Image (cartoon, coloured by chain):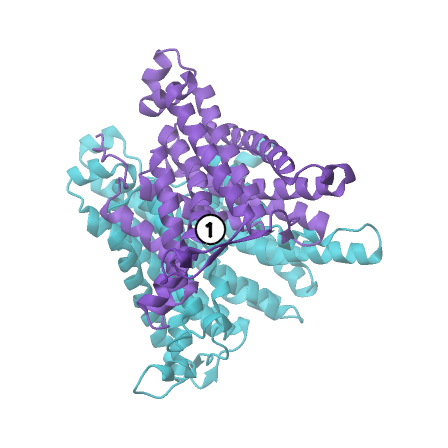
Chain colours: A cyan, B purple
Amino acid sequence: MKIWLRKYSENKLYQGLFLLLFIMVTSLSLYLAQKSVVAFLLLLTSLLLLYYTKFSNAIKWSAGLLVLVVLLPLSASGGDAYESYMEVATMVGIYISMALGLNIVVGMAGLLDLGFVAFFAVGAYTYGIFATGQAANFMPFGHYPLSGNSFWVFILLGCFAAALFGIILGIPVLRVKGDYLAIVTLGFGEIIRIIFNNLDKPVNITGGAMGIPSITPPRIFGIDLVNASQFYYVVLVILIFTIFTVRRFEHSKIGRSWKAVRENEIAAQAMGVPLVRTKLVAFAVGASFSGMMGVVFAGKQTFVDPTSFTLLESITILVMVILGGMGSVPGVILGAAVMTILNLQVLTELTNWLNELSTSGTFVIPDAVSPAKMQRLLFGALLIIFALYRPKGLIPAKNPVYKMEDLSSGNVIQLTEKKQSAEG
Amino acid sequence: MLNNILESIPQVAIDGLTLGTVYAVIALGYTMVYGILELINFAHGEIFMTGAFIGTAMLLLLTGFGWVSALPAIVLLITVLLLTALLTGLLGMGIERVAYRPLRNAPKLIPLITAIGISFLLQDLVRFIAELKKGNYIVTGPSLFTHQIKIHTSSISSIFNDASIKTSFIIVLVSAVIMMVVLDFFVNKTRWGMAMRAVAQDRDTASLMSVNVNKVISLTFFIGSALGGATGVLFAVQYGTIDPYIGFILGLKAFTAAVLGGIGNIRGAMLGGLLLGVMEMFASANLSLLTGGVFGAEYKDVFAFIVLIAVLIFKPEGLLGKPVAEKV
């Protein structure tokens, strides 16, 4: 058995064959057994298996894209559950993007932000306000609602608006550190939510607690995007852009400055890292991904209200980062996917199953302990367990390692390039 | 407009003091733990909430017995207060043992994350115990001490309106003051108090001077949590209705109070709590009047956070704290 395992972990051909078989079996079973959540989850797991194979990055990326772009929608499209699968996949994409944003702030720069969902809210409201008649209440010029074509511009606008808010938040909190920073960002998140909740007077901007209903759906080439299966591709494109950008940032000068600030602020400053700029850029970049996804979220739900942006959401995103591994891009992607699927599918499926059991009279589960209500308990327990026993997360962050001989022999440049291509 | 504000001042002052004493006692828990471990015990607000629920459960249970209702209500309340304080104190000690002690040498971010985890866990545990027992997680306690007293503040000066207070206000105020005085005495005058101050100043040196650091930290958590739990009972008696999510926002405001007074400073926490309570009540009563209806009482939480941010930026050592130079 051991020999087999070792052989498997060394031989690309075996890995490739196994993966191919795995993907084919799972996608076929998903196509044939539409109700099977297990098949859907297993098909997603193939991406994780793919990550651990020994292929070059180009092959990994193209195989992953093939699964995500073609196989997943195709094999899910066979029956009624198509839209609900795509809904979950879309939400996974949205949360991965946000978790990657928070990962920059918490994981790389070491600034604990407990109000991160505020930026998502900023993005969502940016589109929400202008894509409904709401904007006419305070904008003296222009015709509202804007047409669905403007959605694509608003992705950029939401990005900038969120980045701007990130900087606005960043400037006052630069003077506070560590735990204080956590509290202040938490306060900021709550402030934003309360303001959105009450900004229906004196001028009705956000619709207050009622939210903004019937947002214009995005439109491209004359087609209105209304289904989750259509938004799936929008999210996928933005997600790939996000992953690419985060990777580039991580290995750039600013990425190394973030890590330096995280490890030791004073030492970093002494080495010439500009503290203020580094932290502000971290806030702005982290927030901007959130803002983009906020716009997409508003377009997808066609409805925004303050209850989508509570502290629980911020903590959920934080759990994703902690679970996956602070500072580790693949880890955070895994963490976000696991948490979102747990939240949207596993818990609801469990609840449905338990409800069926209690209606059929096998045994009775009181409503109070239904799994869908136990999110807080579960997230709390996950946070504690991971912080205590696995503080580096599921896939710990890797830093490039240099060997002394290589450094002294002068081929450092080559080595780092090789390292980076192997990682990124 | 000025007249309107002046008229309401007696009532605002009384309500503010009630709220302020609640903040002050909770702030003590934050400030003691911070003083000794430099850790924000995020779960403290939830300990307060748990205390409120334990107290209400006991009150509901005890008032169900016939012979208990023959006792004067104040005896009942004191028993419940002491029992709740004991239980929440133990809860606090347990939390420290499980979630903070193993992480004492970890990077600062990690204990903060377990603290958030604990607070979510407690919220949900309390919610579903309450929901299992009562069918609803919003619980209303038995009404004790609801007698209204009118104070004729208008006889002092004609610009004031009369104010009214509930009897429970006096109980809250008196118990809170007793708690704070006893704590102040304990910390400043007893051997254990001295040990606590020593550990707060320098943990390693204190342990060299044969102070049992772990015991002292446990004790600190016990006292802070006991005070928090007892305040929870007082809160439930004063305001009647409780739910599992009160602890969070109240804890945050109590933390603001602790920062306002100077974190780590016990008298500062008391002062900060009272100040914040009065300011918040004043804001919620007069904000819409002052801004011509643009901002209303719904912004009173925002107000508290703005106080917090302003203090942290402009006077991070607080009102009574001493500025500390950063050690490099």
B154, A18: nearer the viewer:
B154
Q: Is residue A227 left or right of residue B318?
A: right
- The location of residue B1, given as percent across then percent down, is 32, 70
Label 1 environment density (alpha carbons within 10 Å; few <14, some 14–19, many ≥20): some
Residue where numbered disc 1 is placed: B249
Residue B2 falls in image quadrant: bottom left
Please give the count of numbered marks on the rendered protein.
1
A247, A183: nearer the viewer:
A183
Name the secondary structure under disc 1.
helix
Which residue is at a point 84% across and 51% down the rendered structure image?
A: A362
Q: Residue furthest front?
A: B155
- The location of residue B54, given as percent across then percent down, is 62, 40
* Chain letter behind tag 1: B
Q: Please, what is the three-letter code of the amino acid marked with disc 1?
A: Ile
Which residue is at a point 68% across and 59% down the rendered structure image?
A: A36
Instruction: Relative to B37, say whether B303 is above or below.
Output: below
Q: Is residue A373 left or right of residue A114?
A: right
* Quarter of the image that includes the N terminus of chain A: top right
Residue B283 falls in image quadrant: bottom left
- The location of residue B38, given as percent across then percent down, is 36, 33
Q: Is residue A151 visible?
A: yes
Which residue is at a point 35% across and 62% down the rendered structure image?
A: B6
Q: Is residue A101 visible?
A: no
A389, A57: nearer the viewer:
A389
- The location of residue A366, given as percent across then percent down, is 74, 51
Q: Is residue A331 left or right of residue B135?
A: left
